[in-house]
Amino acid sequence: MTRDASRFQQHGPAAPDAHAVTGVVIQGTGGIWDIRTDNGAVLSASMRGRLKNEAVAGLKLAVGDRVTCAWDHRDPGSWTIADIHERRSKLARRAPGGARGERVVVANLDQVLVVFAAARPEPHPRMLDRFLVIAEANGLAARIVVNKCDLVDPTAARGLFAEHVAAGYPVHYTSVITGEGLDDLRHELQGRSSALSGPSGVGKSSLMNHLFPGLDLRTAAISDSVNKGRHTTVGAVLHPLPGGGFLADTPGLREVGLWGIDAGDIAHCFPEFVPHLGHCRFQDCIHTVEPGCAIRDALAAGTVTQGRYESYVKLREELESVDDN
C-alpha cells in the first residue's frame, strides 16, 4: 500500500497543543493509520490500550471510520486513536480464504459503484449480481459502471446489462479513452462517500484517475494468458474529492463471499423481486419449486429475468450450505 493517500489532501500534522481531533481513516498498514482531520490535515496514529484489545477481539478499525485522536503526551510527536465513532453504514463481505467472520471493506458509505468492463476481462453478469447482493444486504445504494465501452459496439454493451437496468439499477457506460459517461458519473460522486468495487482489471484505478486528475493511482495491464487483471490496489484507500465527498478505491476481489445474509432474506436483495414478495400462496415460499409462487409467476411473465432468477437460486443455495456447516 502506498502512503501518498491523495494529492487533494493537505498534509501535515494537526496542532500538537490540541487535546483531541476528529477525522476519517483514509488508509492503514502495519498498525499505523492515516487520519484526515476535519480541518483537512493528515496525521498518522496507532491504537493502544482498550481499542487495541477490542481489535484483537474482532472489533476492527476500517477505512472510512470516523475517529477521535489524542495527542500522546507520553510519546511527544505521536497520536493515538482514542475512540471509534459509531458507523452509519458499512460495505462488508465474508473474510476471504475460507476464514469465518466478516471483513469490513469500507465504513460510512453512501453508495457503491460496482465496476465491470464491457470487455477485457469479459463481464460475467452473475458475478455482478453477487456484488449487487452484497451492496443490498449492507443497505447501500448501488450503481453499475460499465467501463471500457470503447472496446465494444455500444448496442452490445447495453445489451449485456439490460436485465440490470430492468431491475432498477442506474447504469453508467464509461470510457477513459473517449471520455464517454465521465461527466455524469463525476456528478453522482460529488458530496457523497462512495466506493468503487468490482473484479480486478476492469479499470477502476484508471477511471478514478480520469474522473479526478491528480490522484495518479497505480494501474496495470490485463494478463492475456488468463484475461484477468493484476491487482494494483492492496487495501482500501479513501480519497477526499475536490468540492466535497470521498471516493474509496478497493482491492479487486477474486473471491466475493456473502456475509451476514440469511438465506430466507436474500430475495429482498433483488429489487425486482420485492413487489412480488408476500403474494405467494405459501407464506414460507422459497421461490424455487412451490406452486403459486409470485416470483416464478413474474419469471414466466418476463418481469423477472431468467439470469437474475438463476443468480438468486445459486446464491440462496450457497447461503443454505453455509448455514448447514
Image (cartoon, helix red, strand yellow):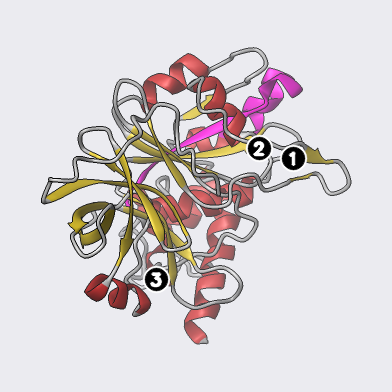
222 vs 319, nearest the viewer:
222
Please name the residue shown 32% across and 71% down the image: 59
Q: Name the residue under label 3.
A: 262
- At label 3, the amino acid type is Asp
Does label 2 or label 1 sit earlier along the sequence?
Answer: 1
Q: Would you say residue 286 sits in the magenta stretch? A: no
Report the amino acid beneath label 2.
Val
Contact, mark 2 vs mark 1 (Cβ under 8 Å): yes
Q: Do the residues labelled 3 and 1 touch (CB within 8 Å)?
A: no
**Residue 56 vs residue 24: left or right?**
right
Q: How far apart are marks 3 and 1 (CA)?
A: 31 Å
Identify residue for label 1: 121
**Taking 195 as reference, is 254 above or below it?**
below
**Closest to the observer, 22 or 280:** 22
What residue is drawn where x is 51% and y is 35%?
144
| Side of 37 where 274 appears, left or right | right
Q: Distance between the residues labelled 2 and 1?
A: 7 Å
* Residue receiving disc 2: 202
Secondary structure under badge 1? loop
